[in-house]
Image (tube, rainbow, N blue to C red):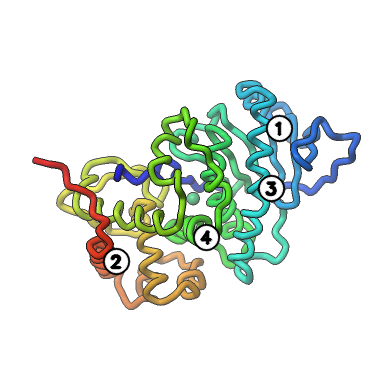
Amino acid sequence: MKQFVSLLLAALLFLSLGACGQKATDDDAVRLVGQYKVVLNDNERKDTYPYVLRTENSAWYLAAADIESMGEEAFYKGLEDILSCAEADMADARMALTGRIWEDVPPVEIRTDFCGKAEISQDAGAYYNGLANMIKLFHSWDTAKFALLHEYVHYLTIHCAEKKTRHYFYIETVAEYVSKFICENRMIRSMDFSHADQPQLKALAEIWSDFDQVKYRNACLSESDAFARGLYDERPYSCVGQYMTVRKADKRLPDHLYELSYAEADSMALYLIGRDGEEKYLDNWDVVDEDKLAGLYGFTVEELLVAWSAWNAEQCEKLGLRMELPQG
Ligand SMILES: [Zn+2]
């Protein structure tokens, strides 16, 4: 198995203005996309995003540059395609978090940025900006399909909750857990990898072309095991703390939970959930101090990392998930 690639799309967290729920009349419609109307954007930044499409759960701001570079028909075909899954996926995520988020979740603002105007798009498939309270989509509709539900969970747990996720470990692992282990995630399942002409998608196809939860869990375990055994020594990876770092041969376990790769953090979340249940894991998502988080499970942070790593190795051994060590 090749390097686990969720880090390629490690969804970066930044930071709020809610989308407004303006109703379009038939006269406003520039065109129809499925059952939805594209209307002229009369809000801010209309030069960049001249059009907007509103659904029950979302307001999509459509960049002129993206429509131009992709071609109008292809752009709107991709939009119609993602919309056929996105609404149901978002409803699933809200359902999964019932009681932990607001009962009435306002539509999320989504902007396309396929032309890569934002530097951040080099690393992320999409990102939720908590300050501006909106999701940006990068690269293509397919990449958007991969990343959108994860980002939507960020919106739910950072913006639409009284008790918010605050530590990077929780911010990222709750988004991963809900979008990939609880929800069906129709968007990922409907990705077409067969004519993926982007390197990002090619790398993803290895794990995601036949998406299912067990395969994903195993990929996280195996990837974590590879870190522990030195396969990734000195290879830069993006950690859940939202920066690039490396693991070193003389120190294969990090000092902090935010230094874990996405695969490792996901494995750690699965370990905690397996140990004391999902409720406890989710109930404490507003923990800021990781010593306190480890303490909830009877550990120091160092002990928790050691215990998790041993558990992960044991799982890999048992399930036959070990990657080959390079020769020589
Ligand atoms: Zn994220």
Q: Position of residue 50 (x, y in %)?
A: 74, 29
Q: Residue at x 46, y 50 (%)?
A: 211
- Please name the residue that numbered disc 4 is placed on: 178
Give SS at disc 4: helix
Label 1 packing within 10 angstroms: few (<14), some (14-19), many (20+): few
The three-letter code of the residue at mark 3 reads Leu
Q: Mark 4 or mark 1: which comes first in sequence? A: 1
**Measured along the vertical axis of the image, is residue 98 above or below residue 124?**
below
Q: Residue at x 53, y 56 (%)?
A: 179
**Measured along the vertical axis of the image, is residue 128 above or below residue 119?**
below
The three-letter code of the residue at mark 4 reads Val
Q: Is residue 37 visible?
A: yes
Label 3 packing within 10 angstroms: few (<14), some (14-19), many (20+): few
- Please name the residue that numbered disc 3 is placed on: 17
- Please name the residue that numbered disc 2 is placed on: 308
- Please name the residue that numbered disc 1 is placed on: 45
